Amino acid sequence: MCDYPFADIQPELLEVAEMLHQLEGRQKVVWLDRILCDADGMCRASDGTTAYYRDGRHLSKEGSRELGCRTGGWFLFGDEPRT
């Protein structure tokens, strides 16, 4: 298993998160940790069959596809779809 505790996220990635927090409100920000991490602070690196990452920082092609499907991919094209 390659799952990891949210607390173990690399410090430089936390700096990036802080920058994104500053942009939020002016730009659309998608927080993948809200999809990948559970209430106990564990973040999933796979769903058991699909590896979400190709290395410690970058999503795999399959992981990108899976997470895009989970979010509806709306963030790539602008506003959320109307229901």
Image: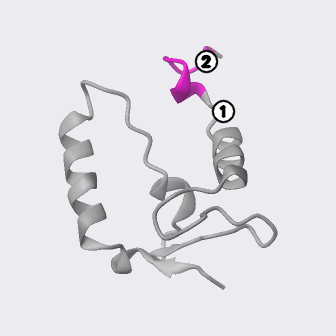
Q: Considering the whole magenta stretch, tell me its main secondary structure.
A: loop
Q: Position of residue 23 (x, y in %)?
A: 22, 34
Above or below 81: residue 35: below
Residue under the point 70% across and 66% down: 51
User: Image point 59% across, 70% down: which residue?
Assistant: 44
Give yes or no for residue 59 being in the magenta stretch.
Answer: no
Pointer 2 residue: 81
- Left or right: 83 as drawn, with respect to 58: right
Which quadrant holds residue 49? bottom right
The crowd level at tag 2 (other Cα within 10 Å; few <14, some 14-19, many 20+) is few
Question: What segment is highlighted magenta in the picture?
Answer: 74-82
Where residue 46 sits: x, y (%)? 68, 69
In this picture, residue 45 sits left or right of residue 75: right
In the displayed image of the protein, which residue is found farthest to the bottom?
1
Q: Confirm or deny contact between disc 1 and disc 2 (CB under 8 A).
A: yes
Task: Tell me if 77 is positioned left or right of 47 in this view.
Answer: left
- How many marks are shown on the rendered structure? 2
Q: Amino acid at mark 2?
A: Pro
24 relative to 42, above or below: above
**Residue 24 vs residue 57, the one in the foreground:** 57
Compared across the picture, whether 26 is left or right of 63 comes to left
Q: How is the image coloured?
A: one colour
Per the image, the residue denoted by label 1 is: 72
Residue 75 belongs to the span the image colors magenta: yes
What is the distance, in whole Å, between disc 1 and disc 2 at their CAs? 9 Å
Please tell me which residue lies in front, 38 or 46: 46
Percent x, y for residue 78? 49, 17
Q: Amino acid at mark 1?
A: Gly
